[in-house]
């Protein structure tokens, strides 16, 4: 069965750690695709907030 796992973090290192922990439990051949996105919110006069997100499309073992 094809599944998705979505990650959303404020810091890229947190995203990296969460994804690595999840991916370590999968067989490489079961990973179909990984999508990555960064969004910045705010204006130049205020502090910008970043959102680092990713989606893993994979085959879940039965």
Image (cartoon, grey):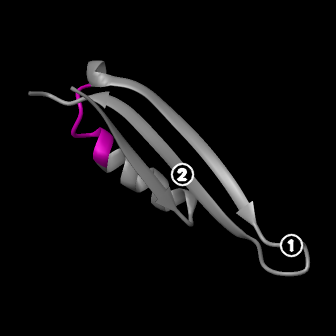
| Residue pictured at 38% horizontal, 54% vertical | 18
Q: CA distance from mark 2 to mark 1?
A: 20 Å
Where is mark 1, residue-wise?
Answer: 43
Q: Identify the residue at the far right of this view.
A: 45
Mark toward the start of the polypeptide (2 vs 1): 1
Q: Is residue 35 left or right of residue 33?
A: right
The circle on residue 13 is none
Q: Is residue 19 left or right of residue 42?
A: left
Where is mark 2, residue-wise?
Answer: 53
| Residue pictured at 69% horizontal, 56% vertical | 39
Measuring from the top left, give residue 62's x and y in whole percent: 8, 27
Picture quadrant where residue 27 is located:
top left
- The part of the chain drawn in magenta is 22-27
Q: Is residue 23 above or below residue 1?
A: below
Q: Foreground residue, 6 or 18?
A: 6
Q: Residues within 10 Å of mark 1 (few under 14, many from 20)?
A: few
């Amino acid at each position: 069965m094809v599944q998705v796992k979505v990650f959303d973090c404020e810091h890229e290192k947190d995203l990296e750690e969460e994804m690595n922990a999840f991916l370590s439990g999968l067989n490489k051949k079961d990973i179909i695709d990984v999508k990555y996105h960064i969004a910045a919110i705010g204006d130049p006069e205020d502090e910008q907030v970043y959102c680092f997100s990713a989606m893993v499309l994979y085959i879940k073992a039965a």
